[in-house]
Image: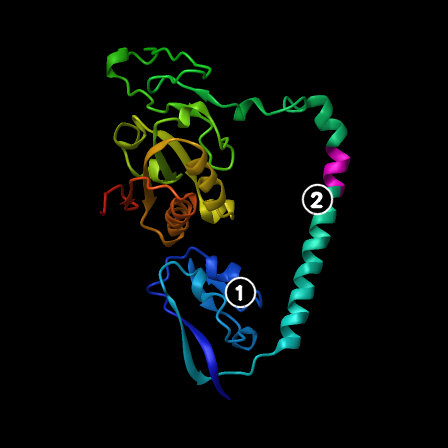
Amino acid sequence: MKRTIIKIDRERCNGCGLCAKACHEGAIGMVDGKAMLLREDYCDGMGDCLPACPVNAITFEEREAPAYDAEAVKRAQAQKNAQKTAHAQHVAQENAAAEPVKKASSPCANGGCPGSAAMALGGNTPRPGMMTMKRESTDGDGGTPAEKSQSMLSQWPVQIKLVPVKAPFFDGADLLVAADCAAYAYADFHREFIRGRITLIGCPKLDDVDYSEKLTAIFAENDIRSVTVVRMEVPCCGGIENAVKRALKMSGKRIPSQVITSSRTGEILD
């Protein structure tokens, strides 16, 4: 039959995956880092996925396609929900069994993990009110301190998922939001990007979260001077760029921003 159905331009798609999350019927999936219509009979042609796409890679078209199968969608949704419930119950059982061991042995058992405590480091000038860690140079390998590269990291933690929404090091900060693999590709990442900035890193593909909500809160509740996004050329990095853009818009603040893209071989592309 001929009907209205979505069309995905895979050349334009940036691989953020937002359309797949917006498709309640489960018609869209990610294949090789790009969105694809996997089940035509699951697509109802209503287009909930269209506004979710930040690069306008999804459109409607009239063409021959299988009829929308509402019953098949319901069965697939029920199976998916059952799997989620079973997994949640399994995790809960494992956590309950491990809880006595955690209480006895975990350093985080008595409130807060030491590894995620907010603190200023020695890479930049410490800001008032923050714990400071002193870093000393050594020449154990025969080199002099002057010959060694120094870390420019100025705060901890750095993971977007771990960093607090409100912290003294955010006040008046120039913020760096970077794909975590960018530092491995770009050789001079500390000196050119981390130096003088507060650093947040993440990977939207591996973390499988939308950073925009937390970034919105950070932008809204702190005096951020500027935002620099450093991403890789790979499509999945579009997720971190789009999260920052949405967060800037939702925060209601006019914060200067820029996006810098690195190739896999460490060349700046724009």
10 Å neighbourhood of mark 1: few (<14), some, or many (≥20)?
many
Residue 213 seen in the current view: yes
The amino acid type found where label 1 is placed reads Cys
Q: Position of residue 217 (x, y in %)?
A: 47, 38
Q: Position of residue 260 (x, y in %)?
A: 27, 43
Query: In the image, is residue 47 above or below residue 250?
Result: below
Question: What segment is highlighted magenta in the picture?
Answer: 93-98
Q: Position of residue 62 (x, y in %)?
A: 42, 83
Is residue 118 rendered to the left or right of residue 223?
right
- Residue drawn at x 37%, y 62% is 13
Query: In the image, is residue 103 above or below residue 256?
Result: above
Is residue 146 rendered to the left or right of residue 244?
left
10 Å neighbourhood of mark 2: few (<14), some, or many (≥20)?
few
The amino acid type found where label 2 is placed reads Val
* Label 1 secondary element: loop
Tell me the number on the disc at residue 126.
none
- Residue drawn at x 33%, y 20% is 124
Q: Is residue 71 magenta?
A: no
Q: Is residue 95 magenta?
A: yes
For this rendering, which residue is in front, 104 or 57?
57
- Residue drawn at x 49%, y 46% is 206
Q: In this figure, which residue is indicated by the disc labeled 1?
A: 23
Q: In this figure, which residue is indicated by the disc labeled 2?
A: 91
Image quadrant where residue 200 sits:
top left
* Label 2 secondary element: helix
